[in-house]
Structure formats: C-alpha cells, structure tokens
Image: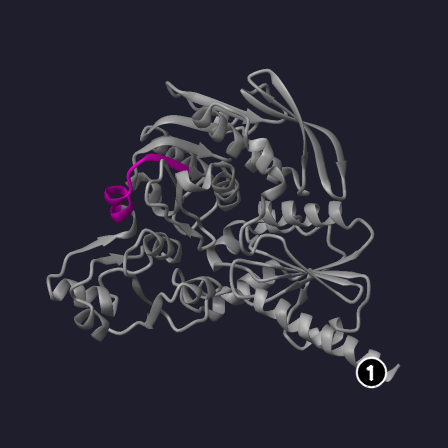
Amino acid sequence: MSALALCLHELGHEVIGSDESNNFFTYPSLAKENIKVLEFNYHNVEKYQNYNFIIGYAYQTDHEEVKEIISRNLPYMYYGDFIESFFQGIKIGVSGTHGKTTTSTFLSKLFPTNKTSAIIGDGTGIGKSNYTYFILEACEYKQHFLSYQFDYLIITNIDYDHPDYFYSIDDVYNTFLLATKKSKTIIINNDDKYLKNIKHQNIITFGITEKSNIQGTILEENEDGYLLDISIYNDHYIISFPFTGIHLIYDFLAAIATYYILEKNTDFIKQIPHLYLPKRRFVEEKISSNILIHDYAHHPTEISSTLLSIKQKYPHYHIITIFQPHTYSRSIYLHQEFQNCFDVSDEVYIANTFISAREKKDKIKEKIVQEIFKKYKRYNKNILNTFQNYENTIFAFLGAGDIFNDEKILFMKINEKTIEKKNKM
C-alpha cells in the first residue's frame, strides 16, 4: 500500500492514508514526499469522503474504517481490483515464493527510467506519466495475484510457504499454475523442479544448471560477487555481478530475460554497476571491527541463502544470527526446515515471534515456537550490552518484523563504546 501511495503521488494524485500507529520501515519514504498517514479512526472516512478509497487486503469488513465506508455507501476498491482497473501499459508481474522484491528492483533499474512505473514490495513506488511498462510485485498469498491479467509473468521459484492459507506444496503449485493462465507470456526459472513442469503457449526460460533461453554460467566466485558468462539465445556476454549469493543470480537472470524480450537489446549491461538491493535486503553497516547486517529473510530457504551470502562475502568473520520468527504458522509447519537453515552461523539467538495483522498474540503457540528453536539461545535486548564488546564479528538480524530496530540499537551502543575508547586514549 505504501508503494501504491508513492506511485500515485508521483503520477500527480493527492494521496492520504491511514494505518496502525506503529512506525513501519516504509514511513520515511512517505514522509519525504509529504504523504499524510493518519492513525486508524472511523472519523477519517467522513473527513475524506470525497476521496477514492483503496483498501489493503489485511483489512476486512469488521475493520472500523472499512465498516464506516460501507455504512456510508461510499465507493471503494480493494488493492488488487484498483491496480487491475487503473494501470495501463505492458503489465509485468513478478511472482515466486522468494526473490520477488529483488527481481522487481533489478528490473526497474534495467528499464529506461522514463518508461517505467512500478509497485515493489519493499515500499518503493515509481510513477512516470507516460510509462510503457508497469512492474508489479505480485504475491501468491491468498491467491491475491489472480486479480490481475498480465502481459508477462515472471515466476522466480516455487516453495512451500504461507501455511496459514496453503495446505501443501501442491496447493501452492496449483495457484501458480492458475496465474500462468492469466498471462500472455511467462518467464520461468528452468532450474526449479516445479516450474520446469509448467506448460504454456509462450515460455521464456532462465537458469544456471539447465539449458535455458537466458543462462548464467559462474566463471568465478569471490568475496565481491561473481564473474558470469551470460548466454542470451546463445550470444555470450561476460559480466561482473556485484552481489554474493546464487539466489541473486537467479533474480538477475529473471530481470534481464524480461528486459531483453521487451527492449530487444543488451543495453542492460550498462546498468549492472548501478544495481542495488531493495530496502531491508542485506543492509550492511560497518562499525569498529564489526559488521552489522539486517535482512528481511524469514523463510528457511531465505535464511540459508542470506547466511551463505554473508559467509561468501566475509569468510573469516565470526557470525552471530539473531532471528525473529514471523507468524506462528510458518514456524510450526516448517519446523523441520528451520532446524538446519542456520548451519553457517557460529551462534544463533531466537527472539519472540513478530505479531502482524495475520495472527493474534498466543502464549501457547509462542511456547511451541520456542520449543522448535530450543537448540538455540533465547534472545532479549539485554544481550546487546554484551554484543557491544565483541570484535571481528558479524551480527545478522534476520526477520520480516521489527528486529531491524535492534540492529540500530547495537550500532549506537558500539559507536558510543568506540568514542569512549578514543576519548580515554
């Protein structure tokens, strides 16, 4: 919703929103553009009744503002319905269990800036008045992405997630299968064991191990990233990819496959040095001899990939991971997968589960979650006082909740200690 607000604002519309009082990581971008965010209150509806109401999927008819909109018989649309009816141009959906936000970010940087509008999952919204391409991060949760008709649909991978909604991996797969039927062309990861079985009249493939239309071969791996041989329909280009982690190569291949098919050139190569990761993805801060990292990783596959990226970039550091579980259901249903995803870490600390709009606080479920992670240490903020004395250590704060705030606290503590040391010298 924050990304949509920013996109509409840049397109010239007046935008006002309402939300919970929490200071979410998306707020600074809204504040920078002077987009007002009110605290939820049904009186907001009367005050702004002449506006068009767009409702996020997290809020249903029992919510005070939604209830007020309906009781006043005011016109409204839910997020997906609005996007489908409002945005024109060539619609590019970016889907997949993992890597949607990074792929969307790469793609938005590869396309010419004046040709692109986008709504990306880290809260980034881009709105260009005469856009050719509309990039939409399209999530499978509760089948939300079935609201859209796509010209091109990227599917990065298929994995089991959102167990509060999907019964099994087959349930997830069938949902993606339905999405492919709503796209004129699909762009898929040919190395993914589920995606390689999908049939469609127009398929473009990317991959590393399997023969694909757009293929990346790793020529060299080092602490700065990779040297890649990119084959585009058998034409070869040698490039330096400035990120660690094989999962990011797949996201990059998905982006350049889409770019090439639409722009019919390889100008994207010039943009590679200007690529960056989305908000809350592998965000690094160096302080004293330590490195603090926070990352949105909250699924076992994402955690493992992120920690391997850290190990590749910083092979000689002691790695401490602080993980905040996200949803009771994910931790409980994927408990076996969570047992081995931290193997790269030297120490692991588990915080309490982050409670979002999806779930209510539940002491019994929290106890079950902590039992799942019992082989690791319990985390509380007091341990930061000990962490500030460490040297040559990486502190990786992982999770989709608010654990990144604790990384900022640790940074300040280490910084204060460093200044104190200098003053004593």
The magenta stretch spans residue 92: yes
| Magenta-highlighted residues | 81-93
Q: Position of residue 102 (x, y in %)?
A: 53, 44
Q: Position of residue 63 (x, y in %)?
A: 26, 66
Q: With 188 as the anchor, is 18 left or right in this view?
A: left
In the rendered image, which quarter is residue 3 located in? bottom left
What colour-coding does the image apply? one colour
The magenta stretch spans residue 61: no
Q: Nearer the viewer, residue 37 or 139?
A: 37
Most distant residue in the bottom direction: 424
Up the image or down, 116 lies above or below 206; here it is: below
Residue at label 1? 423
- State the SS at label 1: helix
Up the image or down, 85 lies above or below 213; here it is: below
Most distant residue in the left direction: 73
In the rendered image, which quarter is residue 392 located in? bottom right
Up the image or down, 71 lies above or below 234; here it is: below
Image quarter of the N terminus? bottom left
Q: Is residue 136 visible?
A: no
Q: Position of residue 51 (x, y in %)?
A: 20, 62
| Amino acid residing under circle 1 | Asn
The residue sitting at 23% across, 43% down in the picture is 85
Q: Position of residue 201 (x, y in %)?
A: 37, 18
